[in-house]
Amino acid sequence: MPANKKKIASSNIFNEQKFLVVFPSALGDSVLCSTVIDKIGFATKNQKNIFVATLPYVVNLFNEVKDIAMAFSYEEFPELLWETIFDWVIDLSGLEYYKLLGDKLQSRQIIYRKFNKWEEIIVQNRTEKYKVIDSLFNLSKNSNLLGHLPVWLEESASLVAHALGDDPLDWLNGKTRPSIKLKNETILEKQNAANEIIFLPCGDWEAKRWPEEYWIDLSSLLKKEGFDIILVLGPKEQKKYRQLKKVVNQCYISTNLIELITIISFRKLIISNDCGPLHIGAAIGMPCISIFGPTNPYKWFWYHNQYQLFVQTEESYQRSSDIGWNVNREKVWKYWPSENQVYEKAMAVLSKAD
């Protein structure tokens, strides 16, 4: 790369720059990548210069997040921004979703990568396009760490670091955890919920869904300890888990993500599949247990503290940590942890919370 392109942006003009961040096309990935908002906000010290393009049903969530001036759908570029020139468009989708925003999107520089060429970072301005080899990707590959890097780092740190003229390794060394800080904290409803545990058996993949009979047995174990079980389902799950609905204390059907936050906040504990709602709960700081099947918890659950733990069998972990492992999303997974293993982890977290 030419010497004059080693540092793409100059920090002394950050406060005057506008950033458009294009999030990935999955809720969990978007929450994991939300740490880039903190990174840009810290560098620029400006809460009005960060805009987000995201999934339509996620827009209402990110419009409530601090440091985001506006969130909107990939396919609905707001008319009031037609005259805006973004200094940086940072596309984290891997699919060039910034193109969906159409000809009205104006930018000085766009930075992105493609799934089939993950090691390359592409920088495009009004007059030229050039490629940068991602040093972090190569470092990870050579040290056999690629399957263990948190996804927010692998998918976003290098792009944002290049835009800010920063070192992506600082992100790894800092171990920044994804977090969602809301503009209106009253959304986090305080509830008299000292003995309530949330079940989130969500997930678009069949392979990620812990079997219903395990949830039923876990509910029985926790009820014996005096806990009430609150089952939370999304629109896609509302016709499922018919037997589980019969044994829990209460069932909510959450229709949007802000409503989800109000339901799960300030409960005793969340127990969940590896899914988007889990990441929202973890990112707002809720104690949680995540049940992992065929996916890698060190890559997709970058929280790991005494109140936020995962449960996974050794067989599942060995497969999920293989860099070349491909998951059949629709196949039922069979190497699940038992209800007793999840119960023991839950009791460990609950004892610390007390």
Image (cartoon, rainbow, N blue to C red):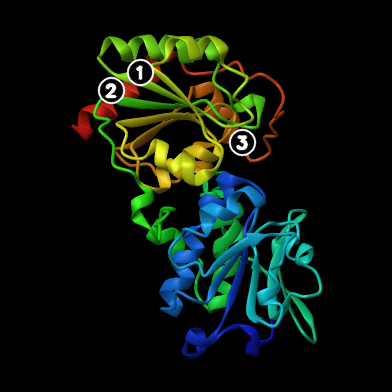
Identify the residue at horizontal 25%, vertical 32% (top origin).
192
User: Which of the labelled discs sits on residue 183, or is there none?
Assistant: none
Q: Secondary structure at mark 1?
A: helix
Counting from the top left corner in percent of width and height, residue 263 is at: 41, 36
The residue labelled by disc 2 is 347
Image quadrant assignment for residue 269: top left
Type of the residue with mark 3: Asp
Counting from the top left corner in percent of width and height, residue 121 is at: 69, 68
User: Which of the labelled discs sits on residue 322, or is there none?
Assistant: 3
Q: CA distance from mark 3 to mark 2?
A: 30 Å
Please identify, in this view, whether the residue under mark 3 or under mark 2 is nearer the observer.
2
Which quarter of the figure is the N terminus placed in? bottom right
The residue labelled by disc 1 is 343
Q: CA distance from mark 1 to mark 2?
A: 6 Å
Give the camera-side residue of 183 and 24.
183
Q: Is residue 143 visible?
A: no
Identify the residue at horizontal 51%, vertical 63% (top origin).
36
